[in-house]
Every structure is written in structure tokens, then in C-alpha cells.
Image: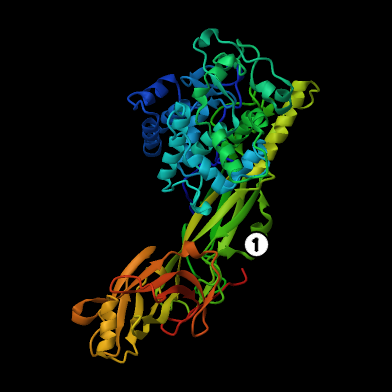
Amino acid sequence: MRRSTTGRRRLALAVVAILAASGCTDDNDRDDAAARGAVDRKSVAAAAAGLPAEPTAAAEQLVATITSDPAGAPAATAELLRRSGLVIMSAKGPVVAAPDQVALLDAPIYAELVPLLAEATREGDRYTPEQFSALLVAVGLTDKPPTFAQLATAVAGWGKQPGDGPVFATAGAAVRALAAQHRQVIHPGAEPAEVWFDPLQTILLLTHATSRFALVSKDAKNGTAAPAPGLFDRLVGGGVAHAEDPKGACGEFTALFAAPDDPVIKANSDFLKGELKDRLAGAILGEGAKEIFDKANEAWGKAGATASAIMLMLGTRIDLTADKTATHFKHAPGSRGEHVMLTATATFDIKVALERLECYALAGVEMPKAGPMEGLTVRWSSQQPQVGTIQKGGNQLLQAVAADSVKMTRGEKTGKDGKSTLEVKPPVEDPPGEGPELRRKATFVAALDKESFPFELGDAYGLLGNPVGYGVGKTFDLLRDVLVKAGLPSQTITIAVTYHGSDILVAKGSNSVNLILASIPNVYVDLVSCTGLAGPFKGKAGYSGVEYSEFEQLAGAVAGIPVPANISGRENSTLSVLTNDRSGPNPFFIMTGEGGKQFLDGVLDLNPDRYLNTRAEILDDWRVGRPVGEVEILLAGNSFPLSDLTWPVLRVTEDPRCPKVTYEYDSL
């Protein structure tokens, strides 16, 4: 059977981040990288041409190019990083692009890997706020993970204050512009589960939170190399990161700067106004956190290693394919034609022919061979409609066949071909073909286990007893720690599932309306959809129980509600509300009042995701259902403040107005 594939996505370990250059090799140590939208001085200069002088406007224009122009995205990404203070380095050593004034000393970026960063950002790879906070702990910036509110407080105003340095204004504006592309606004009141950072955002945030800054030398050609590494540098690998020989493979990078402790950087402290570290410290201390935010010295020592660890994992990806992307519930037990075979393939390919990293914080780490990765554990999981969203007997649209069920709990190691497979099946309809055909979706996730670690420390480095060798070993341990805390790549695939039967939603409620001087004893709505969110919702709504008198009508007039004259009750029993499977408010008409004026209307507000963690509720006839939205009756076009006229829309397993179909999995 021919296989159809989903688009291949590069998944950064923590999609995050940093492509920070972790290796720098000599011309004789590797071949040229394969062309992949190469980033060089010419392309970066072209991306910079014509940009506004104002940092925020320039950042927003570069983000627009990154997200809308596949061909121009790599160079635009490099220029955005450069303007944000990051040095873009060639794998052979030369500087491709350097910041104008202030640069991050501990996080150089490989030019050859920038296209991967741009691609991962465009494809929506993501890093949760929790994962990012874990990284800050891993590098030693804080003792415990910052809360979402603390992160959001720091990021929301980063680089926006008068006088903030251009690199901070650019980086902060870029993070917010990228969030806008996700249709997000990063602020302390946002819902944390709905916020995520793409790889480019995470690079900017992590490097600015953990790196030291240095002034770019006015005369880079005659610049001073960084000082000899101290003991702490050696312990965390930083001693390897900064080559002492300015004429060596990585010498051009160190020659860019004056020494990190040069008084020039202190004398020009205005350049550092707007640092993210300062904003993080203010947010954390401002919320009364117990930990002391004084770990910057430790964080910058680990910054290069952390960035490099994530960069390495950018080359590790997991592709997920299916032999079919749509299926239907079975009409008879024992059939396999409706089964779906999922295949996860773990591979390594950073598109740069490096065998071992020779410079920077991860010198001595040997690269896996390009191609399939054997022996990595693939964890399988699924994201499907809530339990009980369809009829009794079938809680999921698709579940693993009996022989593969253990893979959903323990995972499976990849073979020599780097593959792990999962066979899933739908339940059997009973009776088959009864009722309308419904459509739902099941999403499956394949993730590399956190304990999977594809890199090795070369013997030439791992067995060294000198301080630098010891430093490499400590850095290698840090790399492992970062990967375990941040998580490894994952990939998802969505399977469309059709079935016959009913997806039953009930919107039902009633209450009295207090008109202060009088009341309407009963206002009600009773709607049902047998076809889920798409509707139509059919049923009735109205009012009853009014013992009409001029007093009731006067009371209604005082409240601005045109109660019909001489009518004790009225019902619209032919309601049909179409929603077109659309989340959000869906208004509908019920009836007019006295003189044809607006009287009773309704609104269906459907949003299942909002209620994922909401407890089940009980209807007045004792049916149990799970909320997917709300229905409200409006009086004279408005919500009525003196009576509660809002009720939950519940998904239930049966209703006499809908066909009754049950589902049950066979033994396969």
C-alpha cells in the first residue's frame, strides 16, 4: 500500500533555541556544507538593505520576511540575530556578521545552521514556558523555575523603555512580533497553556538571559583576544569556548572584542540599558521570591554549552507518517481495512559535515553519523476528543491494536532503520451505517524519550586529566542535563475519522426573570445537536407562567423589556441554529415582544478547548455531560443582570431525539 507522508519538520530538541555555534573546524577537517539557503556576508547585507533605522520597526519588518518569504527567511533571520547582539560565525572560523556595538560574548551562532533555525521557526516548532524555565534552572540562572507570570512580566516590556540599548529593543520587539504571528500576546494575564515560544524566540530569550556582553572592537583586525580562561571557565567548558590563539580557527571571533573585564564596557553602561537579565531579576524579586537572583556568573559560564546542546539536537528530528490520513469506524468486527499504520523515523542530519566539534564549549563531542538513529526510544501518545464524547462503548476514535498497546505506555526502541511503528484501529458501529456521517480528528504524537542521548564524548577528550579535559567532561554532563530537562523532539500527525451515529450536544436551561416590580416565572431554552458542534441545534425556547396584567407590562417597560401584552406565555418550537462548527458566539432569534420590539434572543458560545479540565455536570433529568460551551438567553438584546440566564452546553451519550448507535472495539 502506498504511503502518504506529512510534511517533514525539523524538530529542535527544545525547538528552542540556540543554534549557537558549537563547533568550529579547520578547512581540512570537513567538506563544504550542502547548499541550503546559505547565509553569507552578501546575503545578510542584502537582508539589511532598506531596513528602517528605528530598531522596533526593523525587527518587525525582518520578522515579516522570516514568516512570509521562505527564500529570504535565512538571511533575514541572520540579520535579526546580528541586530540583537549575536555574532554569526562560519563553521570554518570567519565572522559572517557582527553586531555594531554590543555583542553577546558567550553565544556565537553557526551561519550554516541558521537556515535550519529559520525553517523550524516557520514550521511552528515550539517550546513551552515550562521548558524554557527549566533551561534557566539548568544553566544556573535561578534556583527554581520562574513562573509564567514572572517570564511574561520580563518579556512584555523588554526593550521598550526610553534609552534602552538597540540590541535589547531589537530582540524584545522580535520576540513580541513573532508572538503576534502566533496570534499571541505575551503578558502576565495570558493563559500559560496557550503561550509557546518558537525556536527563534527561544534563542533570543535564552542567550540574552544567560550570556555576557562585550563591546565590539572598533578595530577588529587588531583586536585583543579574550583573556586566558579561569578555573570556572575550565570547569564548565568555557575555557574551550574562547580560543587563546587569535590566529587559530576561532580566533576571528575572539578578536572582535575587548577583554570582557575591560573598563570600556563598564564606562559605556548606557549600552546595556534594557538587559533581559535585569528585567528577569526585577520580576522575580518583585514577586517576593526567596531565591537570590545572583547566579549570572554561573549562567554565562554555561551559556555556550547550553546553546550548543540545543543546536546539536536541531539536527535530530523525528518524522511521522501514516499509510492513510483518513479512516472510518468498522462496520464488522475482524476487519483490518480501517486500521492505520503510523511510522516514526528518527534521523540525524544537521546539513553540515562535522565529525567532531573542535572549538567552543562542546569541543570533543563526537557527532552521530548522518542517517537513521538506532536504539532511541520512541514514546507514543494521542490527543483525542474527551472520554465520553461519543456513545458508550467507545471512548476513543482510534486506539492501538492489542499487539502494540504496550508501545503507548513503554515506548519502542528504533531499529537499524531508525523506525518505530504503531498500528491503530477504530471501533465497530452497531448498528452499522445508522444516523448521519460525523467527522472527527485524532492526533498521535511520537516523541523521543528524554533518556535518549545520541552524542558521545571522544576518548581523546574524555580521558584527559588536565583542567581543559575535565572541563569538557563537565560540559558534557551539562549537555545531558539540559536535554533531560528540556525534552527531546516530538512530531504529530492527525488522522481524520468518520463514523455514523450521533455526537450529541444539549443546550438546556430555565429560570425566572426578576423585573423588580414583577417577574416572568419561566424563561427557557431546550436545543439539541445530533451532529456535534457543526449543528444544527434544533428545539424550542420561550417563556411561560405570566399572569398578564398592566402591572407586568409596566414592570417590563421600567426594566426596558417589552413583555408582550395579553399573552401569558409563548414558545418558538421550530428553532434551528446553524454554527458551521465554529467556535465563539453564535446568536439566534427566539421571538419579538410588544409592538414587534426585540424581546427574546439567544447566543450559543461553543469552545470545547476552554472546558478540557472542567468537571462533568448533571442535567435536570440526571443525564451526565461534559461542557463544551454555554447558551444564554438575552432580554431586549442584552444580558439580564438580575437573573442567571446562562447554562452549559453539554456533550452527552444519548438523547431520544438522536439516533442511538453504540461502539465497541474488536479483539484485534
> Looking at the image, which is closer to me, 271 or 218?
271
**Residue type at mark 1?**
Ser
Instruction: Residue lying at the far top in this picture: please name it.
Output: 222
Of the pair 462 and 129, the residue shown nearer to us: 129
Residue 547: image quadrant is bottom left
- The structure's colour scheme is rainbow
The quarter in which the C terminus is drawn is: bottom right
Q: Residue at x 61, y 47 (%)?
A: 419
Which residue is identified by label 1? Answer: 405
Q: Is residue 260 visible?
A: yes
> Which image quadrant is residue 18 in?
top right
Q: Residue 595: x, y in percent?
A: 18, 80
Q: Within the image, what quadrant is residue 463 found in?
A: top right
Percent position of residue 200, x then y: 49, 36
Residue 171 in percent (x, y) is at 47, 33
Depicted 452 relative to depicted 250: above or below: below
Residue 6 location in percent, x, y? 47, 49
